[in-house]
Amino acid sequence: MSLPIKKFAVGGIQVAVWKNEGKEGRNYYSVSFDKRYKDKNDEWKSSSSLKANDIPKAVLALEKAYEFISLKEPEQTENKEQEKTLAAAMA
């Protein structure tokens, strides 16, 4: 199983950014989130349900993930352009 490339945690909310390979070798990112909490037996559990006071934490963590992905996108475009230039020069 692959690992996320980045994680963001705010309180008990954790957001993970995943890098995926799509058609024709194009990469894209996806995001997952969960809420971590301890149950009545003091054991850690996960949930995708949020209480009202969890929403601002989830929003902040998701914004951080979006910022991370957005800043990576230009980098990927530059790398692809450099690869094309290098391939053309070698031909």
Image (cartoon, grey):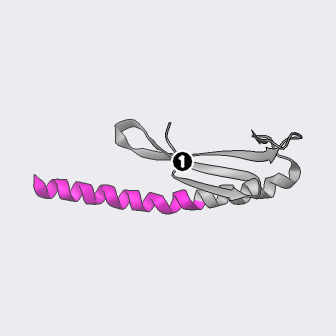
- The residue that appears at 74% across and 52% down in the rendered structure is 13
Residue 54 position, x and y percent, is 82, 53
Query: What is the x, y in percent for residue 91?
Result: 10, 52
Q: Tell me the chief SS of the magenta region.
A: helix
Question: How many labels, in total?
Answer: 1
Looking at the rendered structure, the secondary structure element under dot 1 is: loop
Question: From which residue to which does the magenta span run?
Answer: 67-91
Look at label 1 and name its amino acid: Pro
In this figure, which residue is indicated by the disc labeled 1?
Answer: 4
Q: Nearer the viewer, residue 64 or 11?
A: 11
Q: Residue at x 35, y 61 (%)?
A: 78
Residue at x-position 13% and y-position 58% = 89
- Specify whether 35 is left or right of 76: right
Where is 69 relative to 1, above or below? below
Q: Nearer the viewer, residue 9 or 22?
A: 9
Q: Position of residue 29 (x, y in %)?
A: 51, 47
**Does the magenta run of residues contain 74?**
yes
Q: Residue furthest left?
A: 91
- Residue 21 vs residue 37, the one in the foreground: 37
